[in-house]
Image (cartoon, grey):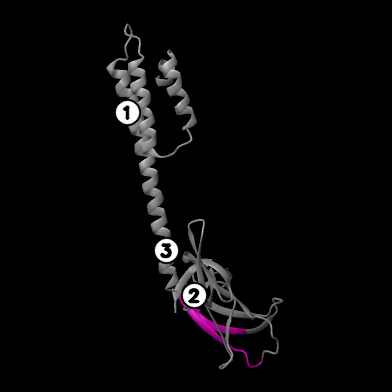
Amino acid sequence: MINSATSATSGSTAVGTTATKTDTTTDASAGQDRFLKLLVAQLNNQDPMNPLDNAQMTSQIAQINTVTGIQQLNDTVKGLVSQFAAQQMLQGSAMVGHQVLAEGNTLSVDTESGQATGAFDLAGSAASVKVQVLDAAGKEVGTVDMGSLPAGRYNFAWDTAGYQGDSALRFKVLAANGDTSVGSTALMIDKVTAVSMDNGSLQLQLSRGGMTTQAGIKAIL
């Protein structure tokens, strides 16, 4: 509406050119200023026999107010997202240096006691629960018989005294009721060494297990 009306005179052409040069400006106040200048130019150059009616003017003012409101809302949301990310980083930094339980099947070995420890979540009651201790090649080097267990979270330990290898040890939980297997989630004990943000998501660096998200941490020990 505004561009077509102002192009009717030479005076309005200059106004239209100015608007084109600044179309890429995203500042809301600058957009309002351009709109008001164009509106004034349109009123000054309108056809006296066919003036702009109140409904048209109201519609154009409503449009610029809508655009300005959306811009301000976007700026507010961006500010809130930045504040939330900073808050996540601050909260995550409190976990640096702490041992945590995270999803993974690597055993933590205490060189002094010779105990290899891990944990798991059992999805349901099981009549028989056994933990297989595996070497890097997936060969079984030991077992831990946990017996019958209800659903829940459990820790276990395996004595590495008889283990002659030097590769990292892993484990696998075998839980069943007769021929029916029961689901489980392997959990490893690790230490948080650093935190970072990746695409708005908090990432935690573990000393042995690579990266994990905040949701991947099951407990702080």
Question: At which x and y percent is residue 126?
Answer: 50, 74
Question: At which x and y percent is residue 219?
Answer: 44, 74
Q: Is residue 151 magenta?
A: yes
Residue furthest to the top in view is 49
Is 82 or 29 nearer to us in this picture? 29
In the displayed structure, does residue 35 sit left or right of residue 170?
left
Residue hosting label 2: 101
Residue furthest to the left in view is 54
Q: Choose top left, top right, bottom left or bottom right for residue 70.
A: top left
Q: Nearer the viewer, mark 1 or mark 2?
A: 1
Taken as a whole, is the magenta stretch helix, strand or loop?
A: strand
For disc 3, the neighbor class at 10 Å (few under 14, some 14 to 19, many from 20) is some
Residue hosting label 3: 88
In the displayed structure, does residue 162 sit left or right of residue 95?
right
Name the residue at 56% across, 84% down.
Answer: 145
* Residue 62 - label: 1
Is 193 or 23 nearer to us in this picture? 23
Residue type highlighted by circle 3: Gln
Label 2 secondary element: strand
Label 1 secondary element: helix
In space, the residues marked 1 and 2 are separated at their CA atoms by 55 Å
Q: Tell me the quadrant of the picture where the C terminus can be found.
A: bottom left
Label 3 secondary element: helix
Residue type highlighted by circle 1: Ala
In the displayed structure, does residue 45 sit left or right of residue 158?
left
Q: Mark 1–mark 3 contact, CB under 8 Å?
A: no
Q: Choose top left, top right, bottom left or bottom right for residue 170.
A: bottom right
For disc 1, the neighbor class at 10 Å (few under 14, some 14 to 19, many from 20) is few
Question: At which x and y percent is residue 116?
Answer: 58, 85
Q: Mark 2–mark 3 contact, CB under 8 Å?
A: no
The mark that comes first in sequence, 1 or 3, is 1
Which residues make up the magenta segment?
143-162
